[in-house]
Amino acid sequence: FFDLDRTLIAKNSASLWVKAELRDGQISTWEALRAGSWLLRYRMGFANMEDAVRRAIQSLEGKEEAPIKERTFAFYDREIHSLYRPGAHAVLRQHRDAGDELVLLTSSSSYMSEKVSKELGLDAFLCTSFEVDERGHYTGRPVEPLCYGEGKVHHAKRYADGRGVDLADCSFYTDSTADLAMLRVVGQPVVVNPDPRLLKEAKSQGWEIVDWGE
């Protein structure tokens, strides 16, 4: 299992998305500042990102899905495609050669996850999905549970159970303390270019720490 933001890629795709949406006139300056504030507070450990994700999804209520999906695909090609860490490709290749299944486990949207999985040749992606009604418009609600925190454990366990695999026999790569729950249930937890809080925890737990470069 692989986290996306600041793990497989060297930056946070949500921050880049907010900037792109502001630049393209899709959101207001106030909306961009509010989103940026949440992201900054989250990075500093002062905000619950799950609340921010729910609010962001709620703000989509009534909007048509297709244009946002198209914008996400274009955004990926323009700004995310070039951000993969060099070390990520090497580790993916090692696991693939060993016959392991490669699964993206991220709080990012299904649109972003679809592009990443196709680019990297992953076997599956587990991510945050949005409810869409029969008209193709957002309801403003996520598909529960969110793929974040304990939610990642839920999605990963359901995936592993479906293949007769125990999480104790799995690996998980991430950069963030938001993924501590998942790190604690896998047999091979690996922290990648970790933030300061995760670095401290990883050292105390004896977890593998790696640098995949920029």
Image (tube, rainbow, N blue to C red):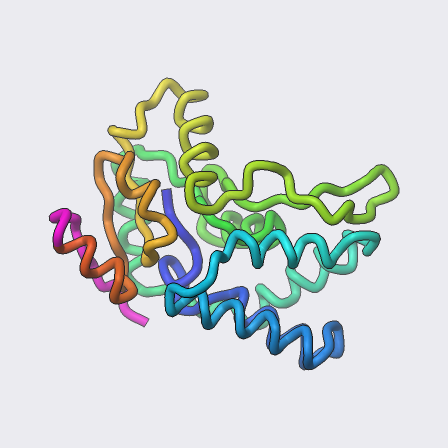
Q: Position of residue 192 (x, y in %)?
A: 27, 58
Q: Residue 17's image quarter?
A: bottom right
Residue closer to the observer: 62 or 6 = 62
As drawn, the residue found furthest toward the front would be 46
Q: Residue at the spot x=45%, y=69% of the render?
A: 41
As drawn, the residue found furthest toward the top would be 164
Q: Which residues are magenta?
A: 204-214
Q: Is residue 29 above or below residue 104?
A: below
Residue 42 seen: yes
Question: Does the magenta portion include 106?
Answer: no
Residue closer to the observer: 176 or 90 = 176
Residue 84 seen: no
Q: Seen in the image, is 69 located left or right of residue 160? A: right
Q: Residue at the spot x=46%, y=72% of the render?
A: 40
Q: Position of residue 132 (x, y in %)?
A: 76, 42
Q: Residue at the spot x=43%, y=60% of the render?
A: 5
Q: Position of residue 174 (x, y in %)?
A: 33, 53
* Quadrant containing the N terminus in the rendered view: top left
Q: Is residue 162 above or below residue 87?
A: above
Q: Is residue 60 above or below residue 46?
A: above
Q: Position of residue 108 (x, y in %)?
A: 54, 53
Q: Seen in the image, is 57 located left or right of residue 181? A: right
Residue closer to the observer: 111 or 204 = 204
Residue closer to the observer: 102 or 7 = 7
Report the label total: 0
Q: Residue at the spot x=71%, y=53% of the render?
A: 58
* Quadrant containing the C terminus in the rendered view: bottom left
Q: Seen in the image, is 89 located left or right of residue 204? A: right
